[in-house]
């Protein structure tokens, strides 16, 4: 590329030429600048997560200039009178200084913490969006796993940060972690000793959590986010079903200029909302909790929301469950919540692979499912959300009891029952609701939308006028696939394997109850009928509401 | 169903006879800003206004930083500083954000663009070429052929991480029996937390609860918190009539005064919520409830073991003392606690 | 939380209230080994107090304060106990439930003192606190530390309240007068344990009161406090308002302009 066709004249042209000759950015720009991104509010949730992550990185970096992760002892000598002279660690003292005595410190701390809460919440919502629309299907299964790892890392980043101020609340949180770790058979006490550098609380753990919090965990997250976005570019974004949207194209706005302005502007909006919340609302008032001391504890000791479900799992374990094997103690009050939580997370991670195995669906999917059009998946999701939500609510049993003036014990027992039956009810209700919505869609396709306009026909009959859909709206309601359960088929050796039977059984659960999209024949039949009526009665579309669609 | 789909579908979607046809992308609808120059001009002004607001926000933030110098003990300065810096920054960020998005929505083209997708799978030619390259590389290196090299390399790679694990060995000391011992020993006086003032039996009235540490703990220079994390005790006097003691441990209390470990046997929170009349001890973290009048057995919540009891007595001067250390490990269970 | 809400009526609650009534107001204090000498009011005050007692309290606590079916013996509970229970409106108790709530006070200050004097005349018990120890200029650092060790587990680190077992709770301490805080510590009302002067000296109690009043009078430097109940309120806030607001923005952002 030595020969120049033309010399650039303008400054911008010259600059662009300088970089292109050295880096070849022209091709890069050509590849990226007009990449198309579909527009939908729910596609912004991942972006909320990404931008709040950036906010947390920026504010967190600022905090590192003032915070010292040392557990050496000191005596507080800052502005907050109720702690003046109190013995505490340097970690807590510098956190207090950031809060009271360094200008801009409190706002940065609050932005960091609020941003972190929003970050994890946005990750969770984004995951739910991806799950309920089936965006994890081929070719995106691997990106689901990357996203799942980001969710785990987000919790890890949150927990390690929560502990850094070394206040009473987070110290008791660490103690709970220590208690859980110690309960792990065989290796528990050794891991605890390794984490705390000896006995709890020791003088090491804050420094170690700090290394994890500001280096190891964010580094892993940045790599994962990079992979996540790279896969997004390889796959191109999914889009909702709509006219002209197919599995072979992507319809939306080009990166330059629309998406740069929208997504770029959105960063400032997320940042601005976090700053506004941080300006007005206290978060984690560490000065209220006092320095960590193993003896005191405050009522309402809870973790940040994203760890709440694990705390809830610990609360919901029944009494007196520990068992002893050959004199070795296995604390089931710790191990069962731990194992149940891990199984739940594993189920989330592998769901795309399970669904693919059951459905034997090997096509690429780029048009999203409306949740109602995948009733079983939606119902499974609802059951999972319910399970998580009960565990989450379980972490605030004491506050629920006070707020609703109920007995703490009753609330806890109710949660235990709900944890077992809630997901079942949620599954059933959701599945029925999805099927009902699908039937309603069929009705609308076949007979039009109810207008609420009632007219009287010449012979005295009253009818409600139904307005037929235009072809674009219509398409949104019929653009989905109908799946039939798989029958167990013998393999090459003529045997029906256990796996085939299992798949068949699961496939039956998935697809036995289903509603097919309206076919052209059905549509034409229904509308021919209407047209006929319209001609004879000189009135717009009429239909018989009594007609029931059954599966 | 399109051709592409069919060629990859070994799936189970039932094909519908004569499905309704995709009508294609909706026609573009013009915005007011596309139709009228006046609206476009207005939108332009609105965007510029938001950017100006942003500048004002930045100025407010700097003013907030400078206007409220923090002087010792005046909390209102801290509050104002955070408030005005936060609001200023928020305004300056939102101004840019709203401005940029408004610009994109009203003035940048809003015709939707279509881009082709391609299957993630490489083309057959590329696949074949890739396989050729790998085979060539394999042949050239002898990776498959030279088994000795391959296997020793696997071995080397398997051993390599071992030092990387071992090097973390000094993260913590080897666990001895420290988890099973506390600072309490025969004759240690029970002292008030945090002052370390010893407690006389006569001071512990019925219905009282004392938060107790071993005498001498408050003066420790090293490992104070580690010792406190194990040795914290709750001291309560119950009407002897209401106390249902294990006969084997009847001598562990003194005239209705009992001392129990404050560390929850579930995961180690301080179990400190004592109800005077029900004699229940509640852990605020996970709601394990222990019945103090019935040797602290678990009556509710996820704990399994009763809180360990500290045997106490009274010395010649009337002070409460420990008869010995706890006779079982305090706090959360660990696998070899009974060994 | 609203302490003036009526209690839920529960069939089993009647039994509970009898039980709690019986043990209420530190009845066990009589067995205390170091009883604080009560100051006895004038004979006139005592007789006035007795009249009020017979009219308002005797049906549950017995005509001589010896206790009856509905309420515990008041022998030896002291003036402080009466002043706390009646002065915060908890007594006379009305509804049944796991615990008595604060209610509008039914008697004048003078009437309360008369009843306190009468009950104090029955047997020695904790006296009304010396105003010297109700000052709020004590050592707030020491008070804060003592509060965290002795009180925060039930009442929360800044006195926002907390749950106990079976529907009982430790009330929020905001707005409670210095005198009533002090009296609660010395008498151990309902299921609260007693903190006698050997455990927390009067100076310690003053420091605790000073700390509570400091926290009450100095709003959080961070802004609105969301009830000071910790991460649960923060989490709910983030999901409902934080994300709610951001999602509203995403909807605006994704909508086509006119």
Image: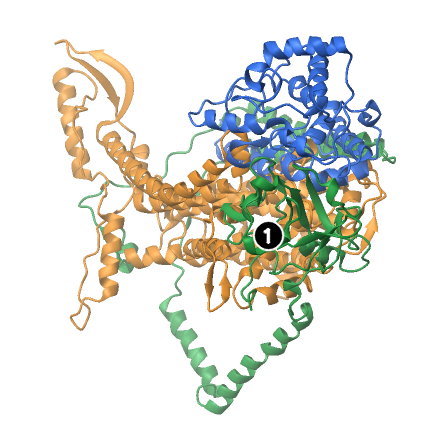
Please state which of residues C13 and A404 is positioned toward the viewer in this rendering: C13
Q: Count the marks: how many? A: 1
Q: Which residue is mark 1?
A: B250
Give the side of residue B135 with respect to residue B59, left or right. Answer: left
Within 10 Å of disc 1 (Cα), the crowding (few <14, some 14-19, many 20+) is few
Tell me where residue A67 appears, x and y as whole percent. Answer: 77, 50
Please state which of residues B10 and C234 is positioned toward the viewer in this rendering: C234
Apparent colour of chain A: orange
The numbered mark 1 sits on a residue in which chain?
A: B
Apparent colour of chain C: blue
Please state which of residues C9 and A197 is positioned toward the viewer in this rendering: C9
Apparent colour of chain B: green
Q: Is residue B333 above or below residue C85?
A: below
Tell me where residue A177 appears, x and y as whole percent. Answer: 59, 55
Tell me where residue A158 appears, x and y as whole percent. Answer: 61, 49
Q: Is residue A441 above or below residue B150?
A: above
Q: Quadrant of residue C238?
A: top right
Please state which of residues A550 and B167 is positioned toward the viewer in this rendering: B167
Tell me where residue C212 appears, x and y as whole percent. Answer: 74, 30
Instruction: Looking at this view, name the residue that lies furthest to the right.
Output: B71
Q: How is the image coloured?
A: by chain
């Amino acid at each position: 590329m030595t020969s120049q066709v033309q010399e650039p004249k303008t400054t911008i042209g010259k600059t662009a030429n300088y970089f292109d000759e050295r880096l070849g950015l022209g091709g890069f720009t050509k590849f990226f600048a007009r990449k198309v991104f579909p527009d939908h509010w729910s596609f912004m949730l991942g972006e909320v997560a990404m931008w709040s992550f950036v906010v947390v990185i920026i504010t967190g970096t600022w905090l590192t200039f003032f915070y010292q992760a040392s557990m050496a002892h000191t005596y507080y000598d800052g502005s907050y009178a109720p702690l003046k002279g109190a013995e505490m660690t340097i970690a807590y003292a510098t956190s207090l200084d950031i809060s009271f005595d360094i200008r801009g410190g409190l706002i940065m701390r609050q932005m960091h913490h609020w941003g972190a809460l929003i970050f994890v919440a946005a990750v969770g919502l984004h995951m739910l969006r991806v799950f309920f629309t089936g965006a994890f299907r081929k070719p995106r299964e691997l990106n689901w796993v990357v996203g799942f790892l980001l969710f785990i890392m987000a919790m890890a980043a949150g927990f390690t940060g929560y502990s850094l101020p070394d206040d009473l609340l987070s110290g008791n949180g660490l103690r709970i972690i220590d208690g859980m770790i110690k309960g792990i058979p065989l290796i528990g006490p050794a891991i605890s000793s390794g984490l705390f550098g000896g006995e709890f609380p020791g003088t090491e753990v804050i420094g170690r959590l700090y290394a994890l919090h500001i280096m190891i965990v964010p580094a892993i997250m940045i790599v994962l986010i990079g992979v996540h976005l790279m896969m997004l570019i390889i796959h191109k974004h999914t889009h909702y079903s709509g006219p002209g949207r197919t599995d072979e194209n992507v319809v939306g706005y080009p990166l330059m200029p629309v998406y740069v302005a929208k997504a770029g502007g959105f960063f400032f909006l997320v940042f601005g909302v976090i700053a506004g919340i941080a300006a007005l609302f206290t978060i984690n008032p560490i000065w209220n909790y006092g320095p960590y001391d193993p003896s005191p504890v405050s009522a309402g000791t809870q973790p940040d929301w994203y760890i709440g479900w694990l705390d809830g799992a610990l609360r919901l374990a029944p009494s007196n469950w520990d068992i002893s094997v050959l004199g070795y103690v296995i604390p089931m009050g710790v191990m069962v919540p731990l194992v149940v939580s891990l199984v739940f997370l594993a189920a989330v991670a592998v769901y795309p692979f399970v669904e693919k195995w059951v459905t034997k669906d090997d096509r690429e999917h780029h048009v999203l499912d409306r949740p109602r059009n995948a009733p079983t998946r939606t119902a499974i999701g609802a059951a999972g959300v319910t399970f998580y939500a009960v565990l989450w609510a379980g972490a605030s049993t004491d506050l629920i009891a006070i707020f609703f003036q109920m007995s703490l014990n009753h609330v806890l027992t109710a949660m235990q029952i709900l944890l077992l039956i809630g997901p079942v009810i949620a599954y059933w209700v959701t599945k029925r609701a999805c099927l009902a919505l699908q039937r309603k869609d069929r009705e609308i396709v076949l007979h039009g939308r109810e207008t609420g306009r009632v007219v009287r026909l010449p012979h005295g009959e009253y009818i409600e006028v139904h307005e037929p859909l235009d072809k674009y709206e219509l398409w949104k309601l019929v653009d989905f696939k109908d799946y039939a359960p798989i029958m167990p088929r013998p393999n090459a050796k003529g045997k029906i394997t256990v796996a085939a039977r299992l798949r068949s059984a699961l496939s039956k659960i998935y697809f036995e109850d289903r509603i097919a999209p309206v076919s052209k024949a059905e549509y034409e039949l229904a509308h021919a009928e209407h047209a006929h009526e319209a001609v004879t009665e000189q009135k717009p579309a009429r239909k018989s509401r009594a007609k029931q669609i059954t599966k | 169903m399109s051709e592409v789909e069919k060629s990859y579908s070994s799936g189970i979607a039932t094909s519908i006879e004569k499905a309704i046809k995709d009508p294609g992308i909706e026609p573009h609808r013009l915005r007011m800003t596309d139709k009228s120059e006046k609206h476009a001009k207005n939108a332009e002004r609105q965007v510029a206004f938001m950017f100006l607001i942003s500048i004002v926000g930045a100025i407010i933030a700097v003013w907030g930083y400078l206007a409220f110098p923090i002087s010792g003990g005046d909390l209102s300065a801290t509050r104002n500083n955070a408030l005005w810096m936060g609001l200023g920054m928020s305004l300056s960020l939102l101004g840019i954000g709203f401005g940029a998005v408004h610009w994109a929505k009203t003035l940048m083209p809003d015709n939707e663009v279509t881009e082709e997708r391609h299957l993630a799978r490489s083309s057959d030619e590329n696949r074949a070429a890739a396989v050729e390259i790998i085979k060539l590389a394999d042949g050239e290196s002898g990776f498959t052929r030279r088994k000795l090299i391959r296997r020793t390399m696997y071995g080397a790679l398997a051993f390599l991480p071992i030092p990387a694990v071992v090097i973390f060995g000094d993260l913590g000391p080897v666990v001895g029996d420290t988890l099973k011992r506390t600072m309490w020993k025969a004759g240690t006086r029970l002292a008030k937390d945090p002052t370390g003032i010893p407690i006389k039996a006569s001071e512990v009235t019925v219905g009282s609860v004392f938060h107790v540490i071993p005498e001498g703990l408050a003066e420790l220079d090293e490992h104070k918190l580690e010792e406190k994390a194990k040795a914290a005790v709750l001291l309560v006097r119950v009407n002897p009539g209401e106390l249902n003691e294990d006969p084997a441990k009847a001598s562990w209390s003194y005239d209705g005064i009992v001392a129990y470990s404050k560390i929850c046997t579930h995961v180690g929170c301080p179990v400190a919520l004592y109800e005077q009349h029900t004699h229940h001890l509640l852990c605020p973290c996970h709601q394990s409830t222990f019945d103090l009048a019935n040797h602290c057995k678990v009556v509710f919540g996820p704990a399994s073991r009763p809180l360990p009891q500290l045997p106490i007595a009274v010395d010649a001067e009337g002070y409460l003392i420990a008869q010995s250390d706890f006779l079982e490990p305090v706090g959360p269970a660990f696998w070899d606690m009974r060994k | 939380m609203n302490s003036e809400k009526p209690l839920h009526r529960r069939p089993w609650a009647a039994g509970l209230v009898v039980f709690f009534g019986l043990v209420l107001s530190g009845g066990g204090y009589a067995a205390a080994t170091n009883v604080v000498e009560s100051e006895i009011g004038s004979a006139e005050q005592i007789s006035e107090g007795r009249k009020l007692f017979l009219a308002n309290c005797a049906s549950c606590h017995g005509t001589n304060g010896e206790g009856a079916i509905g309420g515990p013996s008041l022998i030896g509970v002291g003036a402080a106990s009466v002043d706390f229970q009646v002065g915060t409106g908890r007594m006379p108790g009305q509804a049944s439930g796991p615990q008595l709530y604060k209610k509008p006070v039914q008697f004048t200050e003078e009437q309360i003192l008369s009843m306190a004097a009468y009950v104090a005349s029955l047997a020695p018990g904790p006296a009304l606190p010396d105003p010297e120890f109700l000052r709020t200029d004590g050592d707030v650092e020491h008070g804060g530390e003592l509060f965290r060790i002795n009180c925060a587990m039930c009442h929360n680190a800044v006195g926002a309240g907390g749950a106990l077992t079976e529907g009982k709770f430790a009330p929020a301490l905001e707005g409670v007068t210095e005198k009533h805080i002090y009296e609660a510590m010395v008498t151990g009302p309902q299921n609260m344990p007693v903190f006698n002067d050997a455990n927390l000296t009067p100076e310690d109690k003053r420091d605790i009161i000073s700390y509570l009043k400091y926290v009450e009078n100095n709003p959080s430097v961070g802004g609105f406090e969301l009830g000071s109940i910790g991460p649960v309120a923060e989490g709910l806030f983030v999901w409902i308002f934080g994300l709610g607001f951001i999602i509203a923005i995403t909807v605006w952002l994704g909508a086509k302009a006119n």
